[in-house]
Amino acid sequence: MAVLTPVSDADARALATKFDFGTLSSIEGLAAGSVNSNFRINTSRGVFFMRLYEEQSVDGARRDVGLVKYLSQIGVATPAPLLTSSGESLVTVSGKPAAVFPWIAGTIRCQATVTTHEVRAVGGALARVHSAGEFAPEGVIGEGRFRPEDLFDRIDRIERANDVRFVSEVPGLRRSLELVVAARDSGLVIGLTHGDLFRDNVLWSDQNEIAALLDFESASRGPFVFDLMVTILAWCTGNVLDEVLASELVRGYTEVRPLNDRERAAMLTEGSLAALRFTITRITDFALRTDAVGPAIVKAWKRFWFRYLSLQALGQEKIAAWGT
């Protein structure tokens, strides 16, 4: 289970009282996520979702709930945090900051069922998030925890672990990251990025429309094209990187927000950085984790190294033509 911090019955009952949820029936840990602890709260007044922030400070958690509240208010399909009876959107549970949200009914697509309809809708939804960030309140968009310097620090952590599985991988990871970072264009359009719009962060209605975009905790200020490439790698890769799906996702995105020439020219570089970001963090957050408790689903880092190699094989010219 992705429950790094357990919640006692007493804490759960106190939480239900704070939010005026009526009688608590049960609280269930959810097998989802890698960083935070997530729970389903069943009460006499309905079902709710709670996120316990494991790594974020109170300020970071407050920024996260402030952002999703803003996005919900302007029409982005994401649930706003609920308020306690005293008007607070952030509470303390088991000594850590926590937020509670409505439970949104919906399904998650497995890769085998993803079609051009889904990726086109996801591309458009991502573009609307990018556009929405222009008028976000001051202080709700941070600089993020996965900047290049943070990734180099994580590579250092992998090296210090001296794990036999990764000793030979560290030089290649470091050199690849150095080359990609050196090739980045500093003049790209930047703004609010989701950073983690994977299939498990999109819920679909029975009508096969997007019911909700979830998990803005990795949201930060960054290049839009980087976020677009994260989403392409997440939605368009099974045994191979599917160029038809990738092209449709970009088409859905550009129907809402066109890409300029510099952004298209940066797609290979930013996609390579995205692939390396998840290669590295899946090593540090999953493969090297030694907690007694932790996520049951181990996300394989080699899947994103494969995506990195796939992008190199395709080359800039093919990638830049997606969606045209």
Image (cartoon, helix red, strand yellow):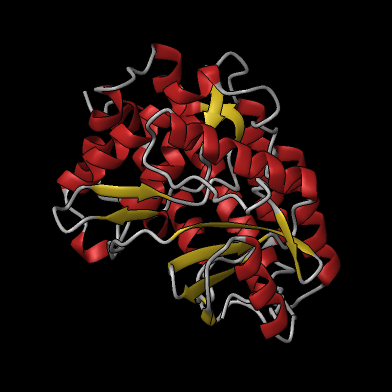
Task: Find the residue positioned furthest to the right.
Answer: 160
Going by the image, does 159 lie left or right of 231?
right
Whether 288 is drawn above or below 173: the answer is: below
Rendering coords of residue 44 (x, y %): 44, 75
Rendering coords of residue 166 (x, y %): 70, 69
Going by the image, does 176 lie left or right of 248?
right
Task: Report the residue at 42% width, 44% height from top.
Answer: 78
Task: Report the residue at 22% width, 38% height from top.
Answer: 120
Question: In which quadrant of the rendered image does the N terminus lie?
Answer: bottom right
Q: How many marks?
A: 0
Residue 78 appears in view: yes
Whether 287 is drawn above or below 140: the answer is: below
Between residue 66 and residue 4, name the one nearer to us: 66
Residue 268 appears in view: no
Whether 128 is drawn above or below 278: the answer is: above
In which quarter of the view is residue 98 placed?
A: bottom right
Rendering coords of residue 313 (x, y %): 38, 44
Whether 220 is drawn above or below 112: the answer is: above
In which quarter of the view is residue 284 placed?
A: bottom right
Task: Report the residue at 27% width, 38% height from top.
Answer: 249
In which quarter of the view is residue 103 placed?
A: bottom left
Rendering coords of residue 173 (x, y %): 66, 53
Between residue 32 and residue 290, name the one nearer to us: 32
Between residue 114 and residue 105, name the one nearer to us: 105
Task: Report the residue at 45% width, 24% height from top.
Answer: 132
Going by the image, does 226 lie left or right of 283?
left
Question: In which quadrant of the rendered image does the C terminus lie?
Answer: top left
